[in-house]
């Protein structure tokens, strides 16, 4: 239970920090089928922020969602 609580707190802290940054580092990808799975270890621009993650532009120019649990804000 503590591990889940700690992860929830970590995600909440990231969400607060991302609201003030313009770039994030994709640290991991929790689902290999997500669009950013090949971008682990790269920085991406933040388009907008939601309660669950951020929106960023992919290579094709499409707006795509990234989970907070997979990123580190700058």
Image (spheres, grey):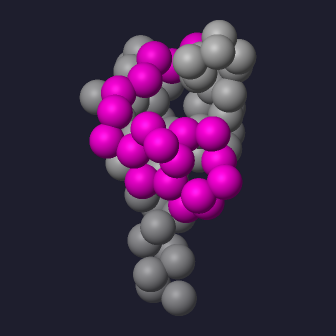
Residue at the spot x=44%, y=81% of the render?
3
Is 36 a magenta residue? Answer: yes
Q: Position of residue 38 (x, y in %)?
A: 47, 43
Is 58 a magenta residue? Answer: no
Q: Position of residue 29 (x, y in %)?
A: 50, 54
State whether residue 1 appears in this view: yes
Q: Position of residue 16 (x, y in %)?
A: 47, 36
Q: In the rendered image of this protein, does residue 69 appear above or below residue 23?
A: below
Residue 48 located left or right of residue 6: right
Residue at the spot x=70%, y=19% of the render?
63
Count the marks: 0
Q: Given the current orientation, which residue lies at the most extreme bottom position?
A: 1
| Magenta region | 28-47
Question: Toward which corner of the image does residue 33 lie, by quadrant?
Answer: bottom right
Residue 39 located left or right of residue 54: left
Question: Toward which corner of the image does residue 31 lie, by quadrant?
Answer: bottom right
Please, what is the dominant secondary structure of the magenta stretch? Answer: loop
Question: Toward which corner of the image does residue 74 lie, by quadrant?
Answer: top left
Q: Position of residue 11 (x, y in %)?
A: 49, 53
Q: Nearer the viewer, residue 10 or 72?
A: 72
């Amino acid at each position: 239970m503590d591990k889940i609580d700690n992860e929830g707190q970590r995600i909440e802290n990231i969400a607060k920090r991302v609201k003030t940054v313009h770039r994030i580092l994709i640290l991991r990808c929790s689902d290999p089928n997500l669009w950013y799975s090949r971008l682990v270890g790269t920085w991406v621009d933040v388009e907008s922020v939601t309660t669950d993650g951020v929106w960023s532009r992919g290579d094709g120019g499409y707006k795509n969602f990234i989970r907070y649990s997979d990123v580190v804000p700058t």
